Image (cartoon, helix red, strand yellow):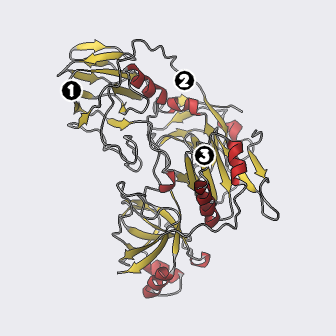
Amino acid sequence: MTLTVEQAGPLTTIQDRGRVGLAHLGVPRAGPLDRPAAELANRLVGNGPDAALLEVTGGGLELTSDAGCWVALTGAPAPVHIDAAPRGHGRAEWLPPGGRLRLGTPRTGVRSYLAVAGGIDVAPVLGSRATDTLAWVGPPLVATGTELPVGHPAGPPAALDTPRPPMPGPLRVVRGPRADWFTKDALDRLCSAPYRVGTDSNRVGLRLEGAAPRRARDDELPSEGMVLGAVQVPPDGQPVVFLADHPPTGGYPVLAVVDPRDLWWCGQVRPGEELRFVRAG
Amino acid sequence: MYAADDRRLGPGHTDPVEPLSLRRVGADAVLVEVADSAQARSLAAYARAVRTPALEVVPGARTVLFDGVPDLDGLASLLGRWSPDDEPEPGPLVEVPVAYDGADLAFVAERWETDVAGVVARHGAIEFVSAFGGFAPGFAYLAGLAEEYAVPRLERPRARVPAGSVALAGSWCGVYPTASPGGWRLLGRTDAPLWDPDRSPPALLAPGTRVRFVAG
């Protein structure tokens, strides 16, 4: 069966768990920014954890189906309609043959996840169906008119899933590998003041505006490997939290590393909103 | 267990080898510091050869990042058996044809106290080795230029450097696999296929590959 994208919305990509083992060749990992939400969407429609789904940024997606299928929407709560009827968020819904699914603009959060039973079955690139927006490894952006093949459902939709949605809070951080490149109080200062989310935040990084951690040394850091959740501080002092499409190496020191359990929030906090860091260990 | 952020390890080493310096990176990653990019390449090659349990092994200029490591203590003792004197197996040799018509040839010639022909001859005489990647898929930091020939980056990066540009920054040489903004000094262009997802490995200049530039 095939889903036809009638309206792509501001930014819609195909994501799965991402590609690993290729960072040394310059390939980012990719994958959904809000992993718990993506995993829930797959479970709701009966998919395995490797199934590909759609990451819809800012809603606005509209698609039709040539066959009946189960779908589920999670993450940022975009209003969802199937044909004329409003439908639920966080549960399996039936999209009938010829039916049209429409997402409005979410009032909170940034990224919604739309899973379909059987998963989006485009050809994998280097072992993954995820689109990386830094280097454009993977399937192309989902555009208006794109036809998305859907695989065979692995099983029935989950009758009941009672997820405990994670609650947003301060981002827990541990000391980063180059904390010694900053003044002794830099990590405490990072954790003492709020930071505003910059409008240029994207799948590569959450760009923050606020108090600049002070450097203890001014020399250039030789390029080194970077991890998901690294809080990198470029020369302008405004921290960047590296997200799924981050470059695998970088030349600015990493002051802190965000706990992987809190990274989902970096994919949902909106530009202009504030967040805080807190030391965890 | 790992009590401290950083620590040194000794087991497996025989004197007078310096112990490896490790820097903890979050929950399941560690940066290993080494002396230079040749050692980083050697350590990364060793780690792959002994099938180190890590999702990613990423050499850098003076480090190797091990990410997605299930057992950091186990990793430490495994890497303790590597010696900085280990020479990695020489990688395959790739010849990259270059049209030397870059915008910064004259600048580089002046820095090197030669003329354009002298730059082409010197650049073509070096056997580079791909040290690490990461700027973009297929991009490689190529080591081999002597420190005395290092050139500064542009003060203001160009908004667009064409795909295939062969360029220098510091003592690194690199080839841009796709058009992108860039501050490296341009020597010329190549049409060598640097990145092809259908090839294995997809990067022409994967770490360890030896590289010669050929005018033509």
Q: At x 25% / y 35%, what residue is drawn? A: A148
Distance, label 1 to label 2, CA atoms, is: 34 Å
Image mark 1: chain: A
Tell me which numbered mark, 1 or 2, is placed earlier along the sequence. 1
Tell me: residue B98, above or below residue A149.
Answer: below
Distance, label 1 to label 3, CA atoms, is: 44 Å
Q: Is residue A91 left or right of residue A189?
A: left
Image mark 3: chain: B
Tell me: residue A162, above or below residue A188.
Answer: above
The quadrant of the rendering that contains the N terminus of chain A is top left
Q: Is residue A173 left or right of residue A38?
A: right
Q: Name the residue under label 1.
A: A64
Image depth: mark 1 or mark 2 in front: 1
Q: Between residues A266 and B154, which one lies in front from this camera angle? A: A266
Q: At x 32% / y 44%, what residue is drawn? A: A139
Q: Which mark is on residue B53? A: 3
Amino acid on which disc 3 is placed: Pro
Is there one chain holding both mark 1 and mark 2?
yes
Point out residue B41 in the picture as x, y percentages from the top left corner. 59, 62
Which image quadrant for residue A19? top left
Distance, label 3 to label 2, CA atoms, is: 33 Å
Amino acid on which disc 1 is placed: Thr
Q: Do the residues labelled 1 and 2 touch (CB within 8 Å)?
A: no
Dot 1: element? strand
Q: At x 37% / y 67%, what residue is drawn? A: B164
Disc 1 crowd, CA 10 A, few/some/many (<14, 14-19, 20+): many
Q: Name the residue under label 2.
A: A168
